[in-house]
Image (spheres, helix red, strand yellow):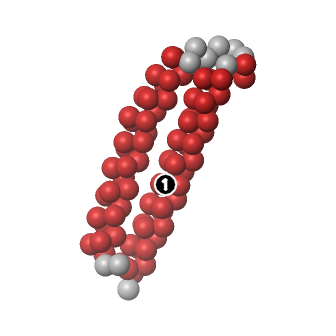
């Protein structure tokens, strides 16, 4: 990939990360409120699903950050040549 393509990809990844950290976190928060998550959410099936969504969201964010790091490393290698 060329330097321009990597920069474009990095910009797209940053936009996806902002969307995940903004909109998706808000959706999870609303779901948590609607699921009536009290002290013992293990008994509440809706709350269990919300927690799975919450964990999945954080996995997606971590994967996206890892991919961004890989692209940044490639850019550094290209610039150092």
Label 1 crowd bin: few (<14), some (14–19), many (20+), radius 10 Å: some
Looking at the image, the residue that sits furthest to the bottom is 81
Q: Is residue 66 placed above or below 36 in the rendered structure?
A: below
Q: Identify which residue, 30 or 64, lies in the foreground.
A: 30
Count of numbered tags? 1
Q: Identify which residue, 22 or 31, lies in the foreground.
A: 31
Query: What's the residue at 34%, 64% (across, down)?
Result: 9
Judging by the rendered image, the residue that carries numbered circle 1 is 65
- Rendered location of residue 15, percent (x, y): 33, 49
Question: Horizontal placement of 24 versus 33: left or right?
Answer: left
Choose top left, top right, bottom left or bottom right for residue 4.
bottom left
- Rendered location of residue 49, percent (x, y): 60, 30
**Quadrant location, the N terminus:** bottom left
Choose top left, top right, bottom left or bottom right for residue 47.
top right
Query: What's the residue at 72%, 19% (across, down)?
Result: 43
- Rendered location of residue 44, percent (x, y): 67, 19
**Quadrant location, the C terminus:** bottom left
**Local SS, label 1:** helix
Looking at the image, the residue that sits furthest to the front is 45
Query: What's the residue at 51%, 17% (across, down)?
Result: 34
Question: Horizontal placement of 44 versus 9: left or right?
Answer: right
Q: Is residue 18 placed above or below 38 in the rendered structure?
A: below
Query: What's the residue at 37%, 44% (across, down)?
Result: 18
């Amino acid at each position: 990939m060329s330097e321009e393509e990597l920069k474009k990809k990095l910009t797209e990844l940053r936009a996806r990360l902002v969307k995940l950290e903004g909109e998706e976190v808000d959706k999870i928060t609303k779901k948590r409120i609607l699921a009536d998550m009290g002290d013992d959410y293990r008994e509440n099936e809706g709350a269990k699903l919300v927690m799975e969504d919450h964990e999945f969201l954080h996995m997606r964010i971590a994967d996206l950050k890892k991919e961004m790091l890989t692209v940044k490393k490639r850019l550094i290698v290209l610039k150092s040549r």
